Image (spheres, rainbow, N blue to C red):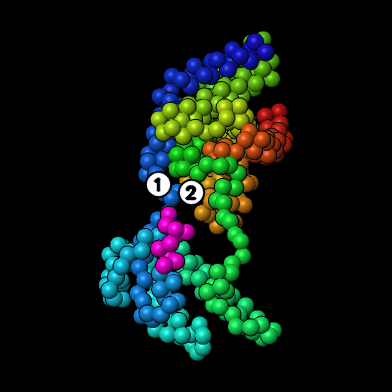
Amino acid sequence: MHAAFVVAAKDLRQRLRDRSAWVLGFVAPVAVALLMSFAFQGGEHFHTKVAVVDEDGGALAMAFTAFLAGPQLDSVLDVVPVTSEAEARALVDEGELGAVFLVPEGFTAAAHDGTAEPMTVLSGVDSPLAGTVARSIGESFVAQLNADRLSMATALAAGAGPVDPSETAGLRLPEQVVPKAAGTEQLTAAGYYGPAMGIFFMFFAIGFGARGYFEERENGTLDRIAVAPVDAGALLLGKALATFVYGVASLSSVALVTGLVLGQGWGPPLAVGMVIVALALTLVCLTAFVIAVAGNDRQADGIASLVIFGLVLLGGNFILLGGAPEIMRKLALLTPNGWALRAFTDLAGGAGWISVVQPVLAILLFCVVISAITVPIYRRRFR
């Protein structure tokens, strides 16, 4: 065991003398995490301006306008007055409005009898989210209106007396939307991109470890260690320990700095530490895998790059997975970094430490699978 610590200390000293290890392990992740957090700051809160072009002038059109300006949508929409459709279209083209509702003539009358042109939602090509939100609001209003009409028609067909439309208009099924799946706090850009960038740069240690192994093999360092009274297991354990310590130090420093500078803590220290340790173990497993399949330091660099970028692209380190297609969210759960991001975002949202148990187990399972693949390859190539 003492020999393993000596080997680990030697590897860490070599790594700390390498400026690129400092840049990729500590400086770059903090800088990029801060940059992305500032760049996407406020993106987690949606708010847009809309307008209503009322060509109907009836009670339903006025009710719809009042609904948009009401307290339920006050945090999402600002209703801007316009005088004509042409003015509204110009404001959409200039980006001043996120969407415009065109309420056609006869919209109110169609609720009682006859047909009318449908309500139309206009949005600019630069504001697709505003268009989607506006369309959903319009569809929701029309769906509620149709439900009220159906209930009145059913009541009249069943022989009920005259129905007051103002009473049926207030009939709504109870609903409550709470956009906080795991915790009680809103996830911020810093809460997502801090861990995402920290994990991304942490994975660069795979290339460092694998390349260092082949460089030592070529310059004879491993041969000299082999003739010393050092067990081969101690040698491998020492190198794994060095990679583990470097990975833990790198990700922990990003967590500490982003927490102090941005005021966005990653969660309870014990829970955060569990995820970091599990990821560092995965780092060791992936480094061993690259060493087992590569033949020299150049191949090690290439394979490590494929592994790193494959994992971060699938795991969602560059995009907010909450807004990604479902297939992306499922693919992310095939990667250890995807599970780690899920754990960190849950913690940042206020979830308790128990929420990290499943992600940690999934990360460790990934490590076991990689080890099961690596061991036979390593034995066949280096026996």
Q: Which numbered marker is on residue 319?
A: 2
Q: Which residues, given as a range, are shown in magenta?
A: 66-76
Image check: 196 left or right of 233?
left
**Quarter of the rendering occupied by the N terminus:** top right
Residue 331 against residue 151 in the figure, above or below: above
In the picture as drawn, the residue positioned furthest to the front comes out as 161
Tell me the kind of residue under disc 2: Ile
Tell me the kind of residue under disc 1: Gly
Residue underneath mark 1: 42
Residue located at (40% from left, 63% from top): 69
Residue located at (54% from left, 28% from top): 247
**Between marks 2 and 1 in the image, the one whose residue lies nearer the viewer:** 1
Which SS class for mark 2? loop
Residue 354 against residue 322 in the figure, above or below: above
Residue 210 at x, y = what percent?
Answer: 55, 30
Q: Does the magenta-highlighted stretch encompass residue 71?
A: yes
Residue 4 at x, y = what percent?
Answer: 63, 15
Label 2 neighbour load within 10 Å: few <14, some 14-19, many 20+: some
Residue located at (49% from left, 88% from top): 115
**Depth check, front residue: 178 or 204:** 178
Quadrant position of residue 182: top right
Residue 105 at x, y = what percent?
Answer: 39, 84
